[in-house]
Image: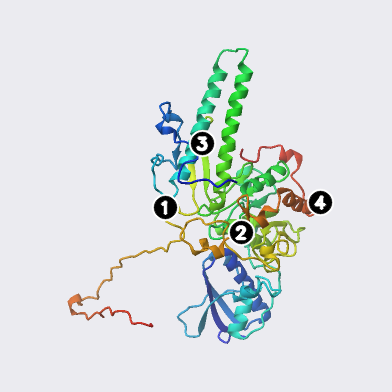
Amino acid sequence: MTMQAREKLILTNFQAPGDILMLTAAVRDLHKCYPNKFATDVRTSCAELWENNPYLTPLDAQNPEVQTIECHYPLIQASNQRPVHFLQGFMDYLNEQLRLRIRPTVFGGDIHLSDAEKAASSPVKEYTGSDVPYWIIVAGGKYDFTIKWWHFRRWQAVVDHFRGKILFVQVGNTDDYHPPLKNVLDLRGKTRLRDLVLLTYHAQGVLCPVTFLMHLAAAVECRDPRLKARPCVVVAGGRESPHWEAYPTHQFIHAVGALPCCAQAGCWRSRIVPIGDGDEKDHPEHLCLDVRAGMPRCMQMITPEEVTRRIEYYFEGGQVRFLAPDTANKNLMKE
Amino acid sequence: MKPRNHSQPVLEDPRARPDFRPEHFPTANGKSAPSPDGRGPNDQKILEFLSVYYRLNCEHAKLLESRGMADSAGGPQTERERMQAIERILVIRDGLEDQYAPMGTIAEPVVRGGFTVDVKFTFGNVNRAGRLRGAAMVSSATIPIRLPPGVRIEDLTLPEEQPPVAGQ
């Protein structure tokens, strides 16, 4: 079908990077399910996630032939009852808006790297002097959903357990809550969005709460062609229903079904305690119902030993290897 | 954990003490500490952490001092006591960190020569500019528009601002 004959769409969304990553999946699968039927462009908060995307065509919003659709994912309202995944959120919305039947074709978002990006050396090499394998660690999160936070001493315990075996690279936006960890390569505040994509491409694994990095871990291809899927351990707790968030190859550590407050599905509450920022998420209906030792009970139940065991699965299974002894002996991590 | 009364600092503000050593009192985000009766939303948290790090600095100074003394029979014992005193303060510091972690407070010490000289604070309720994170942001801009040649603003008819109509 010629360009003129294709239906022209501009899809817009200005939510968080994790949401935009789900939109990349919707755009990919729109074209895979309806080849040559659409020409699509986007206006989003994360232009860097769309670089090298083969499914985008520059479109002028002023062109009367172009339909602009502000994208949402109301499917999340049914996520506690229906077996649906976040990836289907925008697809479901577009199906309703355009009377289509888009189906997911890949279990992950759609990120594309250029040949030059793939050929570039590991960003960690700049700091360590050598191309050592590493895991990305996120030890905090945004202030709007503090209930997703695991205690920083527990993240530290995991890092310390693997000292000499895994190099952890800590990332995080300086405007968010990311307490400093010891014995890591500290890249907090030093990565733009595209830097995170490249950092993930070279990463052996990812350790994080429910956050953008887990979705990026599933969406970015692995530098090592022998690795079919990037190891990822997610400290999830009981907020989100596991089937909505989790990827098949991830170790998604959750407590849904184990506690009264998330007995059948995620609790979807927002904060541990009020933080006094004027946001309505400080109101009682958004607060955790069972706080223990400064953590939601579901998070408090997840021990560092559990997390370390799940990381070890990948090494024990042979998917990845620990640092070589001669590499581990070098002082790679800041004290 | 027993709830604390945040109307009073956990630790006594050392600045009022006659033996106060200002060189050991860190700054907060590079600036002087709030006053003892500070009413900022996070002033009490700041003072609590600075008081803890002040005490750590003082104990560290005592440790260095004892190490510099001539050897004596009580040398190792004195060192042990100094280390234990530091340990007790570190436990208090860790307790503060744990208490405020759910609210998003980070107090990251800047250490030089073994002494904390500054503490970098991040709070969950306000951003770095001191604005409430949940507050709406308002910004405005003045945009000058050059009139076409020969057009005078006096000759233009500009629409008058109408009062809002209910239901619209």
The answer to whether residue B83 is seen in the rendering is yes
Number of numbered discs visible in the structure rendering: 4
Q: Position of residue B131 (x, y in %)?
A: 42, 55
Residue A316 marker: 4
> Label 1 vs label 2: CA separation?
31 Å
The disc, 1 or 3, on the residue closer to the chain's N-terminal end is: 3
Residues tagged 2 and 3 counted as in contact (Cβ below 8 A): no
- Front-most of A19 and B93? B93
Is residue B129 positioned above or below B12 on the image?
below
Residue B130 marker: 1
> Label 4 vs label 1: CA separation?
48 Å
Local crowd size for mark 4, using a 10 Å CA cut-off: few (<14), some (14–19), many (≥20): few
Same chain check for tags 1 and 2: no
Q: Position of residue A233 (x, y in %)?
A: 71, 56
Look at mark 3 in the image and give the residue it sits on.
Answer: B52
Left or right: residue B43 versus residue B109 is left
Residues tagged 4 and 1 counted as in contact (Cβ below 8 A): no
Local crowd size for mark 3, using a 10 Å CA cut-off: few (<14), some (14–19), many (≥20): many
> Hey, what amino acid is under mark 1?
Gly
> Hey, what amino acid is under mark 2?
Val
Local crowd size for mark 1, using a 10 Å CA cut-off: few (<14), some (14–19), many (≥20): few
> Label 1 vs label 3: CA separation?
23 Å
Look at mark 2 in the image and give the residue it sits on.
Answer: A197
Local crowd size for mark 2, using a 10 Å CA cut-off: few (<14), some (14–19), many (≥20): many
Q: Chain of mark 3?
A: B
